[in-house]
Image: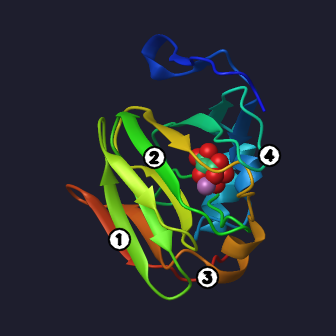
Amino acid sequence: PLSPLTITFGPGNATLEPQGQVLTRRMSDLEGLFVDGHAWRQAVVDGDPVVYTVVSSPVPEVPRELPQSITTIYPGDTGGEFWMTKGHQHPDPQGEIYLGLEGRGGLLLFDGERAEWLDMGPGTIGYIPPGWAHRSVNVGDEPYRFLAVYPGSAGHDYGWVLAHGMGLRARRGDATVELVPFGAPAS
Ligand code: 6PG
Ligand code: NI
């Protein structure tokens, strides 16, 4: 285990200091996730933009530790579907806490039968109970940022979301976010 330490938010809440791993997810990393496969492919060809980044603290992902990360999702939509994280289940079902830092977002939760949507913004704590797959969505015009705190043994299962979906999709509506039935991706 690590020794006790403080970790601070960096400038603009974009980073953690000291910092561990930094992950960058581009459009090409999100294959098979947007319902409009044609629009997805076009976006990959048109510059393959960065959709989100994840900056981790130095706390390792091992049992009994509590790692943290800050995710920044950039604003945009692909075929009308708001930019989002891949989404995952924790193979070892354990809870997780999100804290909204900047921008406007949503937390989509799916337990295989029931889907829930939580509006997220600065100061909102979103609780993910054990056994609920989770995906974050930027529904605004600015980057959406949140802090995540999760058990180090939880793990990340991305195949579960490809197999079961997320129950709902978040689309750009007239004034606000429109939640629609999941539907299978088409290309
Ligand atoms: C976690 C958190 C969170 C998440 C990122 C990126 O369990 O580590 O839920 O840090 O990993 O927001 O989302 P994806 O892991 O779904 O790409
Ligand atoms: Ni998680």
Q: Amino acid at mark 4?
A: Val
Establish whether ligand 1 lies closer than 8 Å to the Cβ of label 3: no
Q: Which residue was labeled with disc 3?
A: 184
Q: Amino acid at mark 1?
A: Leu
Q: Amino acid at mark 3?
A: Ala
Q: CA distance from mark 3 to mark 1?
A: 15 Å
The quarter of the picture where residue 160 lies is bottom right
Crowd class of label 1 (few under 14; some 14 to 19; many from 20; radius 10 Å): some
Cβ atoms at labels 4 and 2 below 8 Å apart: no
Secondary structure of residue under mark 2: strand
Q: Which is nearer the eye, 87 or 16?
A: 16
Residue beneath the point at 36% across and 66% down? 117
Q: Which residue was labeled with disc 4?
A: 62
User: Residue 6 location in percent, x, y?
Assistant: 57, 17
Cβ atoms at labels 2 and 1 below 8 Å apart: no
The tag earlier along the polypeptide, 4 or 1, is: 4
Establish whether ligand 1 lies closer than 8 Å to the Cβ of label 2: yes
The image's mark for residue 179 is: 1
Crowd class of label 3 (few under 14; some 14 to 19; many from 20; radius 10 Å): few
The image's mark for residue 98 is: 2
Residue beneath the point at 72% across and 80% down? 163
Secondary structure of residue under mark 3: loop
Crowd class of label 2 (few under 14; some 14 to 19; many from 20; radius 10 Å): many
The answer to whether 178 is drawn above or below residue 64 in the figure is below
